[in-house]
Image (cartoon, rainbow, N blue to C red):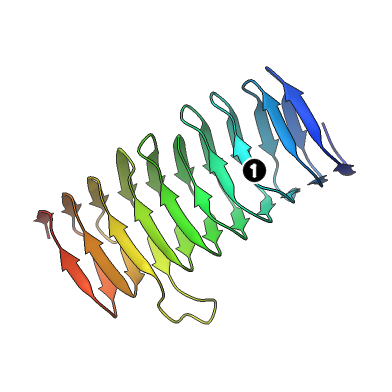
Amino acid sequence: TNYGITKLQTFAYNQATTLDNYGLWYFMGGLNFNGSITIHNRENATMTMTNNFQLSNGSTLENQGLILAKQDLNTSSGTSLSNQYRLEIAGNFNPGGSFSNFGRAYAKRFMNTNASATVNNYCTLLATEGFNNNAALMSNWGTIVMAYAAGIPSGLWQNNMNFFNSNGAKIAGKDFINNASFSGSGALIFSGDTRNQGAFTGD
């Protein structure tokens, strides 16, 4: 449990370890998990991962504060990630387990949901270079945006699996390709090339 400032170099955590952060926690080097662990990043706390971060199978990450991933952030099959405030990822974001977003998740490169993922977005997902949905189940109740920091539409949003876009939900970007079943009654806003090769149902 950290209430102050902790800076760790290469570190390994064993099965059933719990990390509880109320302050500033820096992972300066490699971070290895020898089994499933639990991570809590509390309200007003900041956790920084300097290298690529991989949440191991069976692990849980609950974020109520700010997580800064300086490279890629990946979650394995069987993991649980809940974001209630801010995830800022300098590289790619690749969720592979359960991902529930109640805050803002921002990938400065690419966002890719893997086939083993189940995703529920209730607030904002933002990617600069594009978004590829392969999740077994993905539902959008908020906003998904592909844009540069200045707000200029960017990247490709490609849907390859069944997708639900709820009433009042929005997806916005430059290009759009749909290869699967798309349902719901939300909005799609694209400024470039749009192609549909799947079924649209709903409003």
Q: How many marks?
A: 1
Task: Kindly identify the residue that appears in the image at 47 percent across and 80 percent down.
Answer: 151
Residue 200 in which image quadrant: bottom left
Q: Is 163 placed above or below 158 here?
A: above
In this view, the residue farthest toward the top is 15
Image x and y of residue 58, in percent:
54, 23
Image quadrant in which the C terminus is located? bottom left
Task: Kindly identify the residue that appears in the image at 24 percent across and 57 percent down.
Answer: 167
Image x and y of residue 65, in percent:
67, 49
- Circle 1 — which element? strand
Residue 130 in which image quadrant: bottom left
> Residue 155 vs residue 35: left or right?
left
The amino acid type found where label 1 is placed reads Phe
Image x and y of residue 9, in percent:
85, 41
> Residue 89 vs residue 80: left or right?
right
Task: Kindly identify the residue that appears in the image at 70 percent across and 42 percent down.
Answer: 42
> Residue 175 vs residue 149: left or right?
left
Image x and y of residue 184, in percent:
19, 53
Q: Is 147 placed above or below 97 here?
A: below
Q: Nearer the viewer, residue 34 or 61?
A: 34
Name the residue carrying label 1: 53
Residue 201 seen from this side: yes
Task: Kindly identify the residue that appears in the image at 46 percent across and 30 percent down.
Answer: 77
Residue 169 seen from this side: no
> Residue 184 vs residue 57: left or right?
left
- Circle 1 crowding by C-alpha within 10 Å: few under 14, some 14–19, many from 20: some
Q: Is 116 placed above or below 182 here?
A: above
Image quadrant in which the N terminus is located? top right
